[in-house]
Image: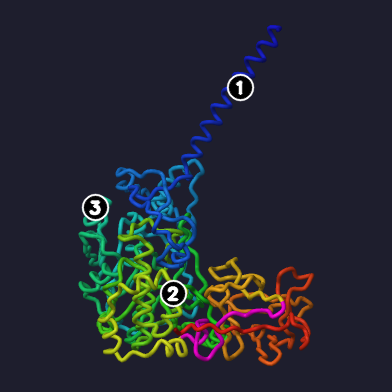
Amino acid sequence: MSHRMKRRVVYFLLAFGIGLFGFCKIVKNFGNQNHSYEPIRGKYSKARDLRNPRDIHVVIGYYQGNSLPWLHSENLTDEILNANMYNPDPKAGKNGEAVILPSFESPKMNKLFQVNRYNIMASDRIPLNRTLPDVRRKQCQDLIYKSPLPTTSVIIVFHNEAWSTLLRTLYSVINRSPREALAEVILVDDASQRKFLLAPLESHVALLPVSVRIIRSKSRIGLIKARLLGAKEAIGQVLTFLDAHCECTERWLEPLLSRIQTKRNSIVSPVIDIINDETFQYVRSFELHQGGINWQLHFRWFSLSSDLIAQRQPNPTTPFSTPVIAGGLFAIDKKFFYDLGSYDEQMEIWGGENIEISFRGWMCGASLDIHPCSHVAHLFRKSSPYTFPRGVGDILHSNLARVALVWMDEWKNFYFKIHPEVAAQAVNQSVERRVELRQKLKCKTFEWYLENIWPSHFFPAHDRFVGKIRNKKSRTCLQSPKAKTFSQPYGQATLHTCILELYPPQIFVMTPDGYIKTDDSVCLDAPEFKSSENEVRIMACNTLERQRWKYDKTFHHVTHLPSGKCLDLPSKTLGESLTLVLCDSHNESQMWLFEDIDWKN
């Protein structure tokens, strides 16, 4: 071998060795970033808590998505957990803008993300008093509120919150609230262990221009009991509850207090805008949403119907009712809070307390409202970093079982049928005191609530069909799509093998006014019926005529009222989607069997 050839071989082997070493390092480093998850201090690894993942797929204050706190994450030391790395850039996050960190900081950012399940590094770059856009309507900005307004105590519960996020919540309350109405801020510490939330927090709040008190629980008691601790100590006429990761916008408080001043029995919530968990960007949410629940008793946002939106056009600054409040952010007259029964003290940690106070509020004399002129941004996480005594499943199921037992009358049987894991917890609940409260307050029935407060609901009822819709020719059943948009099923109306058991995706209701609905407020729809496209879909319910149908019990036809056509099996051109065609009384593919289920017993 020539000298030149030997030198080439050496160079090749050297380059290959360097490349292989680099590749191994990259693989090692990449593998250490995000592929294993372990909760804070490694205390959460009980797989039994994940019995039924659907039970924790909710919106506000609960879990959603696949990033769950009991998955393993990179070990977080005491030094990391107790480090306060707040180091603001005066321009970062200005006017609610996103904070984008340079790529070289990604490994550290991903590691610290696990501490609170949001981007602490982005939060720590943003000043405590950052500016936010004024997103209120012009009519809201022009409103003048009656003076003096009632005084309020703002109650914020926190547990191991990041310094910058907690303090930014506090600063936004102080800086954007009328001083004469803000009696105090009460921070309730639910047994935090992080050192900067102890003496350093005490020292910091002592220098603020309004009264800020810190009430500390020695043991972990959860949101419900911690809020009750704060409420008991409050001196304001109104209790205003906020989460510890919010930012209040300009004149957020006046509309809430004004509503309670004119209507003492109002439980009023702001429009809840969004703080992005990765960039801390402020995002204005769609204003005209009502809170509701699905068949799992999980909170959902549903758009106002088109007729309600039309009714609001002459005066868009008027508060509008909501069947259910989100629960994290609301104001209520203090005396009325206790007259109404405060919180159910036997509910634990959090989960379902907003459903309970919503049912109880409406059924026992309160009015639940959202004020469109009040905007508060809330940081929504994809998962929670917090531990649960007894596990997330048992806590949530126990709380929801209590709600159903006390407030849902015969509808609790339907709920327990489709959720046996909650029914299993119901047998252990002692609800006598809450039932006595309901009797004492002379509360109305759950049927009254559905008919009068939430008439557009999609729950079973005595005035409607409830059951499976089976095609006579194919012997298959209509089924709700698995794909979702904004937490609602969405897609083609398709048929599947009928399930013998009580299977929620195959349960539909047909209302007296002709809407075929199912869980999460979705309806059988024909959005393109005026064109040559006759595809039938399942989409978010509204009050548009195109979603109305009629069932002919003689010919078993499902007729689309606007077009007069009949629901039929899929055509060759539309794939699996059901179609609309001209009615034919002899065609079995247009015959549908409405099979009732016994939901009451």
In primary-sequence order, the first of circles 3 and 1 is 1
Q: Are marks 3 and 1 in contact (CB under 8 Å)?
A: no
Categorize mark 2 by other alpha carbons within 10 Å: few (<14), some (14-19), many (20+). some
The label nearer to you, 2 versus 3, is 2
Residue 352 belongs to the span the image colors magenta: no
Q: Point out residue 348 in the picture as x, y percentages from the top left corner.
A: 30, 68
Label 3 crowd (10 A; few <14 / some 14-19 / many >=20): few
Amino acid type, label 1:
Ala
Real-space CA distance between mark 3 and mark 1, rounded to the nearest whole angstrom: 54 Å
Q: Is residue 457 above or below residue 119?
A: below
Taking depth in this image into account, of 200 and 487 the one nearest to the observer is: 487
Q: Secondary structure at mark 1?
A: helix
Of tags 3 and 1, which is closer to the observer? 1
Task: Identify the amino acid type marked 3.
Answer: Pro
Residue at left offset 72%, top offset 78%:
473
Q: Which residues are magenta?
A: 454-473
Q: Residue visible at 59% across and 76% down? A: 540
Q: Considering the image in quadrants, where does the N terminus appear?
A: top right
As for residue 456 lying within the magenta part, the answer is: yes
Across and down, in percent, residue 178 comes to 32, 73
Look at the numbered disc 2 and give the secondary structure of its residue.
loop
What label does residue 200 carry, if any?
A: 3
User: Which labelled disc corresponds to residue 15?
Assistant: 1
Res 181 visible: no
